[in-house]
Structures are given as structure tokens and as C-alpha cells.
Amino acid sequence: MAKMRAAVFVEPGRIVLDEKPIPEVGALDALVRITTTTICGTDVHILKGEYPVVPGLTVGHEPVGIIEKLGSAVTGYQEGQRVIAGAISPSGHSNACLAGFHSQDGAGARHGWKPIGGWKLGNTIDGCQAEYVLVPDAMANLAPVPDGLTDEQVLMCPDIMSTGFGGAERGGVRIGDTVAVFAQGPIGLCAAAGAKLAGATLVIGVDRLPARLHTARALGIDAVIDAGTLDPVNEILRLTDGRGVDVAIEALGSQATFEACLRVLRPGGTLSSLGIYSADIKVPLNAFAAGLGDLSIVTTLCPGGKERMRRLIEVVAAGRVDLRPMVTHRYKLDDIEAAYELFAHQRDGVLKVAITP
């Protein structure tokens, strides 16, 4: 049986490059040869044992590549075609999908819903930090990449762009809104960019790492706050003349940032939560206005499916956003263990790492 190289989760603290069989292609699947992929913060949660997966799993969920082989029932695509697939790969036919919640896809479940069920690649099935990835339900998930776009131009579409934009969309950002985004890592930067595209006229980015604040400025974020030198809550209230923001987006997954988001909201505002939490979150009574402030707390998991990917590709192709500056480091697949060492420890100003064969 033909083999391929793949980044495999062994145990908490260990993701290693190993050999695995190239997947067999089912009727509804597509085998995609990876040309570029990347490492996500969620992969680091897996590495650290904060998010459980089975040993032996190939990690990664952000594929850009070329269709190597199509399943016998797959139509509308060609072998040799450049494509991306979302980090969320829904079946397209479950109750959750038909209700518009592709990330909670429950195909095969009793009622058709499953929490986080749409996230399969690098979670419940082998992912794409490998030479090949098997994309299930290909006709619901593969989006063609136009010839004029490079891999790195569309590399953020499968996950962080979709997730970040989703945080702005789920928060209901409207024309003229003021939005604060806590944490300017890859997800937070995309959330800030999405808020601007949605019509927010003041977008405030908060972080304490100089490299991230620099990238936020380069992407056109209106105001940045260095949380290492300023109290972000006080500074946001100053910038808004005491009013607070319409939408606060939490993009880290910590008690401190969650609470800060609540404290900067105007009455009736929305906290849009994107972070992955590894401990219980407490809602402080005064920040929550004792439950009487008409506040909303919403959560989002990366919207997926081929139509979502098509729309994000169109945003890139139209020049509305350019996220290439977020690729700060590049590694070959053979060196992916070194890439994890860099990314997991957030060294050398890393934001995103491009991994190529």
C-alpha cells in the first residue's frame, strides 16, 4: 500500500512526522494532494492535551491543494483542479446543516445535531498536515481556487478567515458600529477585518504582543491598545467617551478577556465569543448588569461548506482583504515538528506558518 508523510498526534506534548497509508477514496470523497497548509491554535490545544483526540490521528484542518482522485459519485469537479476545503466539512444533509448550522452537523445522529460535529478534519478523521487528505462529502465541501490567486492568498479561508468573519457576523456588526476585538492573534485579526467589512466605523484591537499590534495596524485596524501598558477597559471607555462598544469580540478563550468584553459593552450590546475555553467561565455580576442590561452573549464555530468558502475566496479575489502579511514563517512538511515548536511557544513574532510539501 502506498504511503505518505503525515503529522501525527502521539500523546499530549508530542506531534511527530510519520508515515501512513494514502487514504482509500469512497464514492462521495475526494483525495486532495496538499500544496499548502498551516498550523492553527486549535492544533496547539490538541498538542497540549487540552482538546482530546485519539492517538494516531493526522492533525490539521486548513487544506489548499489539488484534486488527486474523485469518488465514483462525485460530479462537478475534475482531477487536477485546485481547491480548498473548509475546516468544517459538513455532510450537507443533516438537520443541523439544513437549519444553517453546518458546524453542528449531526449526520447519523438521532436528531441530526451534534455539538462541534462539523469539525471532522484533524478532529474525528485524519486531517491535512500531510501529503494527502481525504475530504468527505466532497460535493458539499470543495471550493475551486481561481488561477489568479496563490495558495497563500486563500490559505486563511478554510478556518481563521471564516471564523473571524463569523465572529463579526454572529455579533451582528452593523454600519456605524464600534467594535472591540480582544486578542490580535490570527482569529482576532480576521475578526477585526471582518468587522470593518461589515461596516464598523471604529474597530479597536487589543493585545500585548508588539508584532501582533504591528500587524493589526498594517491591516488597517482603526485603533490598537497595548494591554501590557494600558488598562484596555479604561482605554476603550475613553475612546468611546464612556459609551462602550456595540460589539465586543473575544478571540483568546480566557476569563480575563471574556470579562473585559462584558465590561466594555454598552447596554444592549453583544459579546461574540470565538475563543476556545479550557476552564469554566464566570460572569461577573456588575459587568452583566445583574442580568438586566439587555446584553447578548453568542458563540461561533467556523462556518464551513463550499458556499462559505466560495464567498471568502470572492472577498480575497475582489481585493477587499489581503491576509498574506499574517504568514510570518514558512516550513517544509519534513520540518513540521520544528514549526510546532515555534508556533506553540509563539516565538519570533509568529502569526501563521505556511507548510508546503
Image (cartoon, helix red, strand yellow):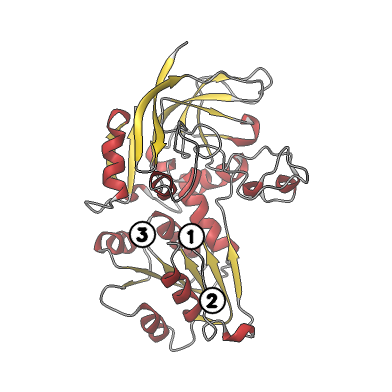
Residue at image location 25% in from the left, 76% down from the top: 229
Where the C terminus falls, by quadrant? top left
**Residue 78, picture quadrant:** top right
Residue at image location 48% in from the left, 48% down from the top: 51
Q: How far separated are the C-alphas under marks 2 and 3?
A: 32 Å
Residue at image location 42% in from the left, 84% down from the top: 237
SS type, badge 1: loop
Q: Mark 2 points at which residue?
A: 283
Q: Residues within 10 Å of mark 3 (few under 14, many from 20)?
A: some
- State left or right for residue 109 relative to residue 70: right
- Amino acid type, callout 2: Val
The label nearer to you, 1 versus 3, is: 1
The outermost residue toward the bottom is 242
Q: How far separated are the C-alphas under marks 1 and 2?
A: 14 Å
Instruction: Check if mark 1's residue and mark 3's residue have beta carbons within 8 Å.
Output: no
- State left or right for residue 309 relative to residue 218: right
Find residue 274 and report its horizontal and vertical position in percent: 50, 60
- State left or right for residue 16 relative to residue 20: left
Q: How far separated are the C-alphas under marks 1 and 3?
A: 27 Å
Q: Name the residue under label 1.
A: 277
- Decide which of 252, 280 is in the foreground and name it: 280
Instruction: Please indicate, yes or no, whether residue 327 appears anywhere in the rendered image.
Output: no
Find residue 7 and report its horizontal and vertical position in percent: 38, 32
SS type, badge 3: loop
Q: Mark 3 points at which residue?
A: 219
